[in-house]
Image: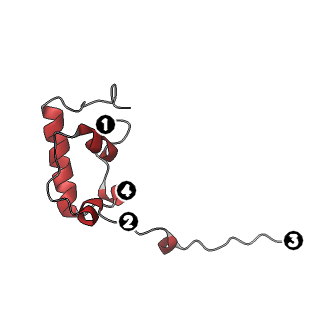
Amino acid sequence: MTLVNEPVDKNSSRKKYCRFKKAGIQYIDYKNPDYLLKLVNEQGKILPRRITGTSLKFQRRVAQAIKRSRHLALMPYVADGLK
């Protein structure tokens, strides 16, 4: 009996989409830290585009909103009080 590895199709996974384009959101509000926490990992780092699936335009807006929210102390810089 021989074992044969099945080929892995890299394109078979779900296609990522920009959640902001799909929902028609034009402005990402920095005053809503609960929503922005979805775009940050456990360490408090901003998740990259390849993981979230956001477009370049909205990834820049997300990063800017998270940085503004951190500056105004609406979100923590570190992971102590994140999750």
Residue at 47% across / 74% down in the picture?
11
Q: Position of residue 45 (x, y in %)?
A: 30, 41
Q: CA distance from mark 2 to mark 1?
A: 22 Å
Mark 2 or mark 1, earlier in chain: 2
Which quadrant would the N terminus be assigned to in this image? bottom right
Q: Secondary structure at mark 1?
A: loop
Q: CA distance from mark 2 to mark 3?
A: 39 Å
Q: CA distance from mark 4 to mark 1?
A: 15 Å
> Which residue type does callout 2 highlight?
Lys
- Mark 3, Cα crowd under 10 Å, few <14 / some 14-19 / many 20+, is few
Mark closer to the observer (4, 2): 2
Mark closer to the observer (2, 1): 2
Mark closer to the observer (3, 4): 4
Q: Position of residue 34 (x, y in %)?
A: 28, 39
Q: Position of residue 20 (x, y in %)?
A: 25, 60
Residue at 17% across / 62% down in the picture?
57
Label 2 sits on residue: 16
Q: Secondary structure at mark 4?
A: helix
For residue 51, which numbered disc appears in the image?
4
Q: Secondary structure at mark 3?
A: loop
Q: Residue 26 or 69: which is nearer the viewer?
A: 26
Furthest-front residue in view? 23
> Which residue type does callout 4 highlight?
Ile
Q: Secondary structure at mark 2?
A: loop
Label 3 sits on residue: 1
For residue 79, which numbered disc appears in the image?
none
For residue 44, which numbered disc appears in the image?
1
- Mark 1, Cα crowd under 10 Å, few <14 / some 14-19 / many 20+, is some
Residue 55 lies left or right of residue 83; in this view the side is left
Q: Residue 36 or 76: which is nearer the viewer?
A: 36
Mark 4 or mark 1, earlier in chain: 1
